[in-house]
Image (cartoon, coloured by chain):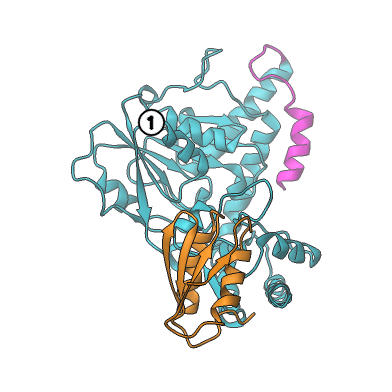
Chain colours: A orange, B cyan
């Protein structure tokens, strides 16, 4: 799985980055997000709820993000 | 009005109320009158009140004065950070909240120890959400209850049962630096700090600020009869304009269960600090619960506990006198700021 490295980036940059990258995969495919910002996990879950995608936490700084929505979640 | 009272009070109320002189007895009368006014609005007896200059310390006093080393502290995931700090190094239970911020007691163990204290934040300052206090208190029949009214102020009545309550004069647009601790029964509460005098607490508030607090209270209560519904209507309008006009936004809580004047919005992909700067340039002073400032690296525990977006957050507080045109201008400023930041 492709990794999106957002270590040392502060909120909301990891969320902006994953929204940009998720557009490059097709529905059902996943990306790994690396981020050590304490806001990433709550914000990633809120992002998934708002955009209709799916997220899971692998460990403290590693998250799996699966594209579930046909829409471009990163339209901004 | 509170400002005029404050200036007048510096002329009349400068003397030490506890000394023997003409000025001191004038000061003593002024102090007693102010305390009586404050007490009557709070519906609490004057002798049950203590005054303290620092809000966080006041809430700390209201809670820890009721705690023994063995007491289990029960508090919610959205409570103020000083409550988290008190809970940190003692026996405690944290109550989760639902996405609408209502305290969820379902996960609680059936038999709580008799010796426990419920720290109950009556309304949350970040989101304005009001708890169903009497329903929650029923679940804790043997616990002592410390109510934090610092945001709820005079907008929410005292619950059926309480042991201490904390108020902040800012909640009725009074001066900064006046906290009020109400103690239901003198024998249940003891000053958590070292005693350095015969008084119940070591802190006090300057007399002019106390007088300004009483005047602000009179004036706020007079206005509130009409302002409460007007501010609620303005908040309804503000929330529906934001919901319709700005995509990808979390609005905290349900206005029906909230204070009428507090509104919290979180915008996806937005840096909260940048948003505040845009709004400041447009002439709006608002607050943020986001962690995007250098001095505060952890996200808002309140928004996180509710499952809401913690970045791009602004808290919009409408004071008495806020006008419809102000809200229209604010919505326009928010729309343009969000779309500008999102497009860069």
Residue B40: give x, y in percent of width and height: 50, 40
Between B76 and B326, the one nearer to me in the picture? B76
Residue B9 within the segment the image draws in magenta: yes
The residue shown at (72%, 48%) is B1
Q: Which residues are magenta?
A: B1-21
Between B108 and B223, the one nearer to me in the picture? B108
| Residue A56 appears in the picture as rendered | yes
- As drawn, is B104 to the left or to the right of A50? left
Residue B208: give x, y in percent of width and height: 70, 32
Mark 1, Cα crowd under 10 Å, few <14 / some 14-19 / many 20+, is few
Secondary structure beneath disc 1? Answer: loop
The residue shown at (63%, 16%) is B18
- As drawn, is B280 to the left or to the right of B63? right
Q: Is residue A72 above or below residue B140?
A: below
Residue B112: give x, y in percent of width and height: 23, 39
Between B12 and B71, the one nearer to me in the picture? B71
Q: Is residue A42 above or below residue B41?
A: below
Q: Is residue A41 above or below residue B87?
A: below
- As drawn, is A40 to the left or to the right of B328? left
Residue position marked by numbered label 1 in the rendering? B90
Residue situated furthest front in the rendering: A1
Residue B297 within the segment the image draws in magenta: no
């Amino acid at each position: 799985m492709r990794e999106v490295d957002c270590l040392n980036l502060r909120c909301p940059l990891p969320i902006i980055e994953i929204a940009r990258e998720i557009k490059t995969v097709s529905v059902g495919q996943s990306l790994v997000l690396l981020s050590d910002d304490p806001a990433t996990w709550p914000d990633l879950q809120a992002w998934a709820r708002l955009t209709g995608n799916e997220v899971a936490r692998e460990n403290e700084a590693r998250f799996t993000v699966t594209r579930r929505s046909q829409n471009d979640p990163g339209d901004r | 009005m509170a400002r005029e009272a404050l200036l007048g009070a510096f002329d009349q109320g400068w003397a030490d109320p506890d000394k023997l002189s003409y000025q001191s007895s004038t000061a003593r009368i002024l102090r007693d009158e102010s305390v009586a006014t404050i007490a009557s609005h709070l519906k609490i007896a004057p002798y049950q009140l203590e005054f303290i200059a620092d809000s966080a310390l006041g809430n700390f006093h209201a809670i820890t004065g009721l705690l023994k080393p063995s007491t289990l502290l029960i508090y919610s995931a959205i409570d103020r950070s000083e409550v988290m700090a008190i809970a940190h190094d003692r026996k405690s239970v944290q109550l989760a909240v639902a996405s609408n911020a209502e305290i969820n007691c379902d996960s609680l163990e059936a038999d709580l120890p008799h010796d426990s204290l419920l720290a109950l934040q009556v309304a949350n300052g970040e989101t304005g959400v009001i708890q169903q206090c009497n329903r929650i208190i029923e679940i804790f029949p043997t616990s002592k209850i410390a109510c934090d009214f610092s945001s709820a102020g005079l907008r929410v009545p005292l619950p059926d049962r309480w042991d201490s309550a904390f108020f902040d004069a800012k909640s009725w647009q009074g001066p900064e630096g006046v906290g009020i601790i109400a103690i239901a029964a003198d024998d249940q509460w003891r000053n958590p700090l070292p005693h350095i005098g015969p008084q119940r607490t070591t802190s006090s508030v300057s007399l002019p600020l106390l007088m300004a607090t009483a005047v602000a209270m009179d004036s706020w209560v007079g206005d509130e009869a009409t302002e409460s519904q007007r501010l609620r209507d303005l908040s309804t309008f503000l929330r529906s304009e934001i919901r319709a006009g700005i995509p990808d936004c979390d609005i905290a809580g349900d206005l029906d269960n909230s204070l009428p004047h507090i509104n919290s919005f979180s915008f996806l992909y937005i840096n909260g600090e940048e948003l505040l700067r845009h709004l400041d340039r447009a002439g709006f002073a608002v607050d943020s619960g986001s962690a995007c400032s250098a001095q505060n690296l952890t996200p808002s525990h309140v928004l996180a506990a509710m499952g809401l977006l913690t970045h791009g957050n602004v808290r919009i507080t409408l004071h008495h006198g806020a006008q419809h045109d102000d809200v229209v201008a604010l919505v326009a400023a928010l729309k343009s700021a969000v779309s500008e930041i999102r497009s860069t």
